[in-house]
């Protein structure tokens, strides 16, 4: 597509209705909206029946103790049985569950029968170690099949997993293990990234060195790197190979906790978002079928890491509950060459691709010549998640990757919502490039004003969810008060999502990014406070303020403003040292793109840092209203600092 065609398309504000062929075979029709509107709970009842239950539920939703919801009250099920065994029992044991591709090019084909064997063995092995129901098992692993086995084995035992992204530092890992008080950690010696082994075990050793209650560390051998070994370490292969392949799963209550997943909030430490079993799996399965229009012959690839919620709901639980064939890829998109993803799509005949706008923008920058060298004709559906997708990236995705024939579903949701909430339905919704369009059937999203009043079409405000939904978070681990404060205290009974949004005149929803101090960098949630704390923990730093500035590739880029203590020497490497320090404290994803050393920070008279003004500076814009500044001269100083600061990376 030439630049001018793209401009025209954007300018025309075009909509893309489903093709008649696609609409004719789609899983979901417009009737779903009417059905859910007529009786929302009956609608979710019906979706839950697509899972295998032991005892049926007696009540669909108990909201009497709001905001602590119970879905499918008294129902019993086993999540792992629903994702594994039932597909074997229904005659699909030989169907491929996972096509694994390691970064070096090694592969594994895992059928549902194999999955049953592996998960059963892992469950028996974990039981032998002492893992029981209600335990919190921390998983810190690369994208390898054992990570999926470990998650499903925990689920099978009724133990919660807490997956920590492998890119997080030892410090970040420790705080998560501590918060969950995990007695067990599952990890690997390392994983392959960018053509070389990257270590994981040393970070676990560092994180757990002083945590006496960590009883066992199970280690998968993936890279053959040397690892330090103590009595509490045990090799996965030695433990699991020796275990029995027979395991009868116990049925648990629908509200049995399934996992914790830590995510960044506005203040303080990351919070452990708690999800439970029946409602979560119901919405994962429903949305997987509805949003991706999943058909049994599809080969589905979600590129998210299992360390994020997308990896939980749409690499593991949704697709496996549906009995789908998924692709699992270990490495980076540019290893050993920049066409690796497209090569994988051609190789595995991927028909559904689900990825993030930041990846699409990166590929667009690398040039269409790269994907054009591969046969992408197997693709029939494309998805996007993690941040607002800009119309240019949407059009590029549609045209270059989707050959103008694949619908794009831009799915809005959060770690807290558990599963997709706002998204086009590919057989029903006419899409507009850059919009997530409408709430899904059975989901009551509103855009509200400061007072929590629902706004009319044509207006903008805060995104809110007005009624409980099956896969909603059930709390924050160990902190009910924070759960209520963060999400439910602005407007009673209404969930505050933290995103700005606006309605177009026809009711189309446009997401406008976070309204709190959470940044979205390459689709990853990072709190300004966390990065500020990391900066301040560097010797010689007196104060720091951090903002997310618009960035062409990563959506937002982290920009730090740092005040040094009077005696600190400004060495040529100081800015780089500070960036490396943050990377070490939190992880490379939190490394600031730019840091400016300044003399003062703009503050209100009550002492609050005015991040809005810092964002103006970081984005090189004319300053907004400065009348509430305690000292307006500060901004001139920062501008000067800005001119001197050079762009990093
Ligand atoms: C943002 C990721 C616009 C949003 C599943 C949300 C999006 C945060 C979209 C949650 C989208 C996610 N359009 N913004 N399609 N998807 N977001 O918890 O700001 O990692 O609040 O969950 O990402 O990020 P989280």
Image (tube, grey):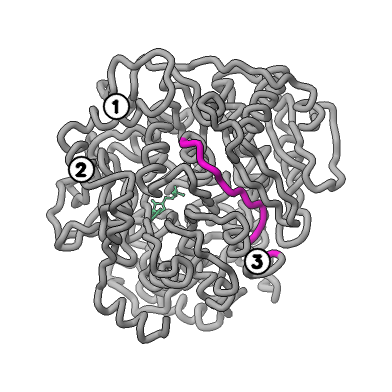
Q: Which residues are magenta?
A: 322-335
Q: Which residue is mark 2?
A: 31
Q: Secondary structure at mark 3?
A: loop
Residue 619 position in % (x across, y down): 42, 75
Quadrant hosting residue 121: top right
Spatial distance from mark 1 to mark 2, Cα to Cα?
16 Å
Q: Residues within 10 Å of mark 3 (few under 14, many from 20)?
A: some
**Contact? badges 1 and 2 (CB < 8 Å):** no
Q: Position of residue 598 (x, y in %)?
A: 52, 72
Label placed on residue 45: 1
Q: Quadrant of residue 38?
A: top left
Q: Residue at x 43, y 32 (%)?
A: 281
Q: Nearer the viewer, residue 238 or 320?
A: 320
Residue 276 position within the rendered picture, expressed as x and y whole percent measured from the top left: 44, 28
Which callout, 3 or 1, points to the residue nearer the camera? Answer: 1
Task: Judge: label 2 CB < 8 Å from ligand 1.
Answer: no
The structure residue drawn at horizontal position 70% and vertical position 45%, both measured from the top left corner, is 108
Looking at mark 3, is its residue's CB closer than 8 Å to ligand 1?
A: no
In 3D space, how far apart are the residues under numbered discs 3 and 1 (Cα atoms)?
44 Å
Residue 191 image point, x, y percent: 73, 49
Residue 186 shows in the view: yes
Residue under numbered circle 3: 334
Q: How many marks?
A: 3
Question: Local crowd at mark 1 within 10 Å, few (<14), some, or many (≥20)?
Answer: some
- Mainly helix, strand or loop, the magenta region? loop
């Amino acid at each position: 597509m030439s630049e001018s065609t793209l401009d025209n398309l954007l300018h025309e504000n075009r909509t893309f209705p489903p093709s008649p062929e696609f609409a004719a075979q789609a899983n979901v029709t417009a009737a779903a909206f009417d059905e859910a509107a007529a009786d929302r709970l009956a609608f979710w009842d019906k979706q839950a029946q697509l899972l295998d239950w032991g005892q049926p539920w007696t009540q669909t939703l108990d909201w009497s103790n709001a905001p602590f919801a119970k879905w499918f009250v008294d129902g019993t099920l086993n999540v792992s049985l629903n994702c594994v065994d039932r597909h074997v029992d229904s005659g699909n044991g030989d169907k491929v569950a996972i096509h694994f591709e390691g970064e070096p090019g090694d592969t594994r084909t895992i059928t549902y029968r194999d999955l049953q064997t592996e998960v059963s063995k892992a469950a028996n092995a974990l039981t032998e170690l002492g893992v029981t129901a209600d335990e919190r098992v921390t998983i810190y692993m690369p994208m390898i099949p054992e990570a999926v086995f470990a998650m499903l084995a925990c689920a099978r035992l009724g133990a919660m997993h807490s997956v920590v992204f492998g890119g997080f530092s030892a410090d970040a890992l420790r705080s998560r293990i501590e918060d969950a008080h995990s007695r067990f950690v599952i990890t690997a010696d390392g994983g392959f990234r960018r053509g070389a082994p990257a270590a994981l075990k040393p970070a676990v050793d560092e994180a757990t060195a002083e945590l006496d209650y960590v009883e066992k560390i199970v280690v998968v051998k993936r890279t053959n790197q040397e690892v330090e070994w103590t009595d509490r370490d045990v090799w996965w292969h030695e433990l699991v190979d020796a275990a029995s392949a027979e395991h009868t799963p116990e049925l648990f209550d629908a509200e049995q906790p399934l996992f914790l997943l830590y995510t960044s909030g506005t203040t303080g430490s990351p919070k452990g978002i708690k999800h439970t079993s029946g409602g979560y799996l119901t919405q994962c399965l429903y949305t997987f079928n509805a949003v991706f229009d999943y058909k049994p012959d599809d080969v589905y690839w979600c590129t998210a890491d299992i360390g994020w919620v997308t990896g939980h709901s749409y690499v593991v639980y949704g697709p496996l509950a549906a009995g789908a064939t998924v692709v699992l890829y270990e490495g980076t998109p540019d290893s050993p060459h920049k066409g690796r993803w497209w090569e994988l799509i051609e190789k595995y005949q991927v028909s559904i691709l689900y990825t993030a706008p930041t990846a699409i923008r990166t590929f667009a920058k690398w040039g269409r010549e790269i994907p054009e060298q591969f046969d992408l004709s197997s693709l029939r559906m494309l998805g996007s998640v993690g941040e607002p997708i800009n119309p240019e990236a949407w059009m590029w995705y549609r045209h270059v990757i989707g050959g103008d024939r694949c619908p794009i579903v831009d799915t809005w949701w959060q770690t807290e919502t558990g599963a997709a909430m706002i998204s086009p339905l590919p057989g029903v919704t006419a899409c507009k490039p850059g919009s997530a369009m409408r709430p899904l059937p059975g989901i009551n999203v509103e855009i509200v004003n400061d007072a929590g009043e629902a706004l009319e079409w044509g207006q903008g405000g805060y995104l809110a969810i007005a009624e409980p939904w099956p896969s909603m978070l059930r709390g924050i681990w160990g902190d009910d008060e924070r759960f209520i404060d963060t999400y439910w205290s602005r407007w009673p009974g209404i969930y505050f999502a933290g995103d700005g949004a606006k309605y177009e005149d026809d009711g189309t929803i446009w997401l406008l990014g976070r309204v709190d101090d959470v940044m979205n960098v390459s689709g990853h949630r990072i709190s300004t406070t966390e990065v500020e704390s990391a900066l301040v923990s560097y010797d010689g730093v007196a104060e720091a303020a951090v903002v997310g500035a618009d960035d062409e590739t990563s959506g937002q880029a982290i920009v730090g403003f740092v005040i040094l203590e009077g005696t600190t020497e400004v060495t040529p490497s100081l800015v780089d040292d500070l960036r490396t320090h943050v990377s070490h404290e939190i992880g490379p994803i939190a490394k600031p793109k730019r840091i400016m050393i300044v003399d003062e920070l703009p503050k209100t008279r009550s002492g609050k840092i005015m991040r809005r003004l810092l964002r103006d500076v970081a984005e090189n814009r004319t300053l907004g209203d400065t009348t509430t500044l305690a000292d307006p001269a500060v901004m001139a100083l920062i501008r000067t600092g800005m001119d001197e600061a050079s762009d990093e990376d």
